[in-house]
């Protein structure tokens, strides 16, 4: 807006600040809690200043785990989450970009049908089809494996749909120029479509990585072996202890660590895709 | 470098036929311009030559090889698109080199050929830039370079200048013509701009509704348009078309009841209905006694060098007998004037009233051709 009214400025800043506080406060509390002793949070008053137990708390979750709740050391869970999130993000992008390529650039029988079938799966997220999916995964012997964690989540229409929409905006002349230059379909895909999709791939990677990292229900179902626990379900296990008070300091330390990878991905990728957005401007 | 033969080519989209059998023989090294209004099928025809559209019927030969079932990449052609279609993520060098890379040339060969073409087009300073960092004219040049560098059998250009501003268009038009002449590659150029068509073409193909109405040199198309469509399309302002009826020795009866007797043309048999075509630039103001026509001036456009007098034949009913005359710029004329005009000898065209086809049997042998030939021979001797 071009208006310059001090009152309006004040108001808009106020709204923004309130919004930021609402979003940031819980995160702040989590960080504070991870620096405090085990009983500080039971005293009735939530402390708002850092305490002296930071190193102790983090050392405990990283190296020994929380034995009372059966949670393994956090490192293994982080690796599992990372593997799962990367597999889901990369797998989804790979599958959806090739299927969008097929749907947009090739004329084959039942092409529309294929598109709509993919599209309809949008209405069937994991939670809806969780029981049959579990049955299939169990029958295939994929329980307690990385494949079982990631493959059922890879099949999805969102990314296919996004790539399809993007491919439709690529001018036909570009395809034709490539054909005249003698490029076959796969060359065209690799040399032209893939580089042009770079920004879309980056954006999707961010979204899908976080989606994969935050998966909770599915890992909870398909893993019973602690060696395959992911961090998000690990947090839940730590917080839910039988016959004892949850050790909030440790749980929150885990939470803070669990938050880091998505933050890193967002920060790194955001730079790439903002650059990409600016570049693709003609 | 090779000849292109288009024989009996038809194109259907579903049940609608959009190209109704086109035959064009293009000699090696010739610059052919296909011109026509939008929707006449000129781009479709070009895309069929390129292999981007399937050919419903007929054959297309490039260099003596029928290419109907070949992929565009196998036809040994290069195409320049209206919006240039440069690969946005590649540098100018890579854009030009891409086709050569696919063709499997060695890196040194590619560098040599791209370098040579870039020098020819003065693109050397831009080789590392991306297309978005270039101006419209430079992009256009890169698109030309991408075609040139492959040294194809034929260039296909689909309205390559229509995204440029007027000044640049004139400049690029000249450059394209010079480039084509220096490399001697057959070129097929599609445009809707008649000035581009006239200036670039060795021969012109005027298309209308999926039919090639006339294929001839630009001057022949201008001097002897084969149909009323061609007559109206080539030339600006458009040729005047007056419905007439032959009145034997008196000449032709106009819509306003008067007769006109154009010189240096045979007259049709008495009673035959025809269309008399006269270009605005072939009407001259004369003194009243010698007038073929009288123009009731309605509007005047002064263009500096010329003055255009719009109006209708004196005494003609509303909506008929509209006429434009191109007069010398110094002519004093105002709306409301009654202007006596004469048709220059040999500059009248007669077309069949129903089919619109030129009544070629009425043409006398062209004088201009006879006058030019000895001069050309004298120069050659």
Image (cartoon, coloured by chain):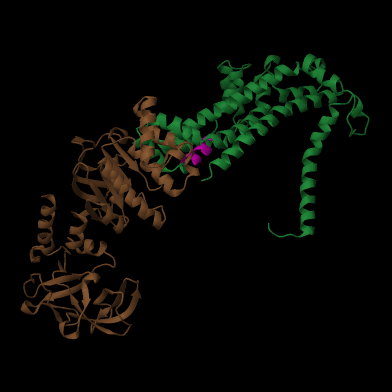
Chain colours: A green, B brown
The N terminus of chain A is located in which quarter?
A: bottom right
Q: Is residue A163 magenta?
A: yes
Which residue is more in the foreground, A259 or A174? A174
Provide residue A264's location: percent of width, then percent of height: 69, 29
Instruction: Answer left or right for A92 relative to A15.
Output: left
Q: Is residue A22 magenta?
A: no
Query: Which residue shows up at 23% across the image and 83% down it?
Result: B314
Establish if A150 lies above or below A99. Answer: above
Provide residue A203's location: percent of width, then percent of height: 59, 36
Which residue is more in the foreground, A124 or A99? A99
Q: Is residue A249 visible?
A: yes
Instruction: Answer left or right for A244 relative to B72.
Output: right
Query: Which residue shows up at 61% across the image and 28% down it?
Result: A130
**Could you say which quadrant of the image residue B110 lies in?**
top left
Provide residue B258's location: percent of width, then percent of height: 16, 82
Start and end of the magenta stretch? A158-167
Establish if A224 lies above or below A92. Answer: above
Query: Which residue shows up at 10% across the image and 53% down it?
Result: B377
Provide residue A210's location: percent of width, then percent of height: 65, 31
Instruction: Answer left or right for B292 relative to B90.
Output: left
Q: Is residue B14 visible?
A: no
Secondary structure, magenta segment, majority class? helix
Which residue is more in the foreground, A48 or B85? B85
Which residue is more in the foreground, B313 or A188? B313
């Amino acid at each position: 807006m071009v208006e310059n009214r001090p009152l309006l400025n004040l108001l808009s800043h106020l709204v923004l600040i309130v919004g930021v506080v609402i979003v940031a406060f819980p995160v702040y509390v989590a960080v504070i809690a991870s620096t405090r002793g085990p009983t500080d949070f039971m005293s009735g008053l939530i402390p708002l200043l850092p305490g002296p137990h930071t190193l102790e708390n983090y050392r405990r979750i990283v190296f020994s785990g929380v034995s009372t709740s059966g949670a393994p050391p956090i490192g293994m869970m982080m690796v599992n989450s990372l593997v799962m999130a990367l597999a889901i993000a990369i797998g989804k992008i790979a599958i959806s970009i090739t299927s969008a390529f097929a749907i947009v650039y090739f004329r084959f029988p039942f092409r529309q049908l294929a598109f709509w079938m993919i599209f309809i799966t949008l209405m069937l997220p994991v939670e809806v089809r969780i029981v049959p999916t579990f049955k299939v995964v169990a029958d295939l012997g994929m329980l307690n494996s990385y494949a079982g964690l990631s493959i059922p989540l890879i099949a999805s229409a969102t990314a296919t749909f996004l790539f399809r929409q993007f491919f439709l905006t690529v001018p036909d002349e570009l395809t034709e120029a490539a054909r005249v230059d003698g490029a076959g379909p796969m060359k065209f895909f690799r040399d032209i479509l893939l580089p042009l999709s770079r920004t879309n791939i980056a954006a999707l990677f961010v979204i899908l990585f976080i989606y994969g990292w935050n998966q909770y229900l599915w890992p909870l179902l398909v893993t019973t072996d602690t060696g395959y626990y992911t961090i998000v379900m690990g947090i839940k296990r730590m917080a839910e202890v039988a016959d004892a008070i949850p050790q909030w300091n440790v749980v929150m330390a885990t939470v803070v660590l669990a938050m880091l990878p998505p933050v890193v991905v967002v920060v790194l990728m955001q730079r790439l895709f903002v650059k990409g957005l600016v570049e693709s401007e003609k | 470098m090779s000849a292109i033969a288009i024989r009996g080519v038809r194109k259907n989209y579903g049940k609608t036929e959009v190209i109704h059998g086109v035959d064009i023989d293009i000699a090696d090294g010739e610059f052919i311009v296909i011109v026509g209004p939008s929707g006449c099928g000129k781009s479709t025809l070009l895309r069929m030559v390129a292999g981007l559209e399937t050919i419903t019927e007929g054959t297309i030969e490039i260099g003596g090889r029928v290419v109907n079932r070949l992929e565009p990449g196998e036809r040994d052609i290069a195409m320049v698109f209206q919006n240039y279609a440069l690969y946005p993520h590649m540098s100018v060098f890579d854009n030009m080199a891409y086709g050569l890379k696919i063709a499997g040339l060695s890196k040194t060969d590619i560098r040599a050929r791209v370098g040579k073409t870039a020098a020819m087009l003065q693109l050397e300073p831009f080789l590392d830039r991306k297309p978005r960092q270039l101006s419209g004219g430079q992009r256009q040049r890169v698109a030309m370079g991408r075609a040139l560098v492959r040294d194809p059998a034929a260039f296909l250009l689909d309205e390559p200048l229509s995204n440029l501003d007027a000044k640049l268009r004139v400049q690029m038009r000249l450059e394209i013509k010079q480039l084509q002449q220096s490399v001697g590659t057959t070129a097929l150029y599609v445009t809707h701009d008649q000035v581009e068509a006239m200036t670039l073409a060795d021969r012109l193909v005027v298309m209308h509704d999926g039919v090639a109405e006339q294929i001839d040199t630009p001057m022949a198309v201008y001097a002897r348009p084969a149909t009323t469509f061609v007559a109206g399309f080539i030339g600006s302002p458009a040729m005047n078309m007056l419905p007439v009826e032959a009145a034997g020795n008196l000449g032709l009866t106009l819509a306003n009841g008067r007769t006109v007797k154009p010189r240096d043309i045979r007259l049709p048999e008495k009673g035959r209905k025809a269309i008399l075509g006269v270009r605005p630039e072939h009407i001259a103001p004369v003194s009243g006694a010698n007038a073929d026509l009288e123009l009731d001036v309605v509007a005047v456009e002064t263009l500096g060098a010329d003055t255009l007098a719009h109006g209708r034949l004196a005494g003609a009913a509303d909506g008929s007998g509209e006429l434009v005359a191109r007069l010398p710029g110094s002519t004093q004329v105002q709306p409301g004037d009654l202007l006596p005009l004469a048709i220059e000898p040999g500059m009248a065209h007669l077309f069949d009233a129903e089919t619109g086809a030129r009544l070629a049997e009425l043409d006398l042998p062209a004088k201009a051709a006879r006058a030019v030939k000895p001069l050309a021979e004298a120069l050659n001797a």
